[in-house]
Image: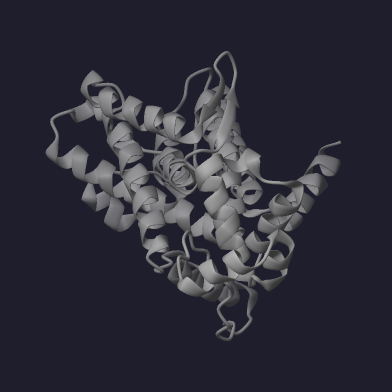
């Protein structure tokens, strides 16, 4: 049975999208960390030994700059680690719900860079706040979890498709922009509660980066490109393969194209002739503009399929 589960996990990791892969990595790390915790608990007569904290903190980011300098990997590993069941459950649900929207709109290749950079922005916000704010031990000296990275994706989704409709239990259909605003507002008012203060600062750091990422993308500056290049070089070193050659840049996602040529082309022909005359990028622009005005649900099946295929390029 376990072998079959493992084969299914490997298959999903190899053929699934980036959201699926990130969720799998988080779940695997969660299982490993908690298995170590259980083994140490029972092998020590029903109490956790000090070694467990030493082992766990080896992978966690700290507000102590000496720990950060001596454990640089913790800047990345901390955003994939969770201890509590509800902590990982809600983070992964949010990642799946909002990440799917982001992946469909700006492409699967931008998901991991947004996750990593959003997580690093959260780490920076946590570190700075923990060293200048007086929340002390209530904020903790170590931080873990994907919350900041997930908040970057949540805010990015709200920026990309503010009128997208999500159906919430007990509340019904609500536009994405209101859900995202509520989540950010909850973190803001939670700063004064002296409970997980450093964590809330980290969430807001990730949220600000999600906003910044989309604004830069709209200006034509894709922050995911250098991250993907670096990741390609790192994976190439481990696989023993040379770094990939510089590829031709594919179509760039945009939100508005108000050029006179496009307006003239639309004015001259009907819907069918327009669809054939529009370039690939212009068709994507048109679909994104429609989402912005009327929400994702207003798209036809053909438009959804076209946008899904475009996001893979």
Say left or right for 84 vs 270: left
Picture quadrant of residue 183: top left
Image location (x, y in percent) of residue 96 = 60, 39
Residue at image location 31% in from the left, 32% down from the top: 200
Q: Is residue 144 visible?
A: yes
Q: Quick one: which residue is furthest to the front in this view?
A: 268
Q: What is the quadrant of the N terminus in the image?
A: top right
Picture quadrant of residue 265: bottom right
- Give whichever of 279, 193 is nearer the camera: 279
Residue at image location 60% in from the left, 42% down from the top: 296
- Give whichever of 101, 28 is nearer the camera: 101
Is residue 188 depicted above or below 21 in this figure? Answer: above
Image location (x, y in percent) of residue 223 = 41, 65
Is residue 107 depicted above or below 294 in this figure? Answer: below
Is residue 168 depicted above or below 248 in this figure? Answer: above
- Give whichever of 8, 286 is nearer the camera: 286
Image location (x, y in percent) of residue 8 = 81, 46
Q: Is residue 59 visible?
A: no
Image location (x, y in percent) of residue 4 = 86, 42
């Amino acid at each position: 049975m376990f072998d079959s589960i493992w084969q299914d996990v490997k298959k999903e990791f190899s053929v699934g999208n980036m959201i699926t892969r990130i969720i799998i990595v988080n779940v695997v790390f969660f299982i490993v960390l908690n298995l170590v915790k259980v083994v140490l608990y029972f092998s020590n007569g029903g109490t956790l030994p000090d070694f467990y904290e030493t082992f766990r903190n080896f992978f966690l980011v700290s507000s102590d700059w000496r720990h950060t300098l001596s454990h640089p990997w913790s800047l990345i590993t901390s955003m994939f680690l969770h201890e509590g069941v509800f902590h990982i459950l809600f983070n992964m649900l949010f990642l799946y719900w909002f990440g799917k929207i982001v992946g469909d709109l700006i492409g699967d290749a931008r998901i991991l860079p947004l996750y990593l950079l959003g997580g690093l922005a959260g780490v920076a916000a946590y570190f700075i706040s923990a060293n200048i704010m007086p929340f002390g031990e209530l904020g903790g000296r170590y931080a873990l979890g994907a919350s900041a990275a997930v908040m970057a994706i949540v805010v990015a989704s709200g920026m990309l498709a503010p009128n997208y409709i999500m159906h919430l239990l007990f509340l019904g259909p609500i536009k994405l922009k209101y859900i995202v605003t509520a989540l950010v507002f909850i973190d803001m008012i939670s700063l004064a509660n002296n409970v997980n203060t450093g964590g809330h600062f980290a969430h807001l750091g990730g949220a600000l980066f999600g906003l910044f990422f989309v604004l830069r993308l709209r200006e034509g500056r894709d922050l995911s490109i250098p991250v993907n290049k670096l990741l390609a070089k790192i994976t190439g070193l481990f696989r023993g393969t040379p770094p990939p050659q510089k590829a031709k840049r594919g179509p760039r996602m945009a939100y508005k194209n108000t050029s006179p040529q496009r307006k003239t082309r639309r004015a001259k022909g009907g819907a069918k002739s327009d669809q054939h005359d529009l370039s690939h990028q212009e068709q994507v622009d048109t679909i994104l503009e429609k989402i912005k005005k009327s929400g994702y649900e207003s798209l036809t099946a053909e438009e959804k399929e076209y946008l899904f295929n475009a996001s893979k390029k």
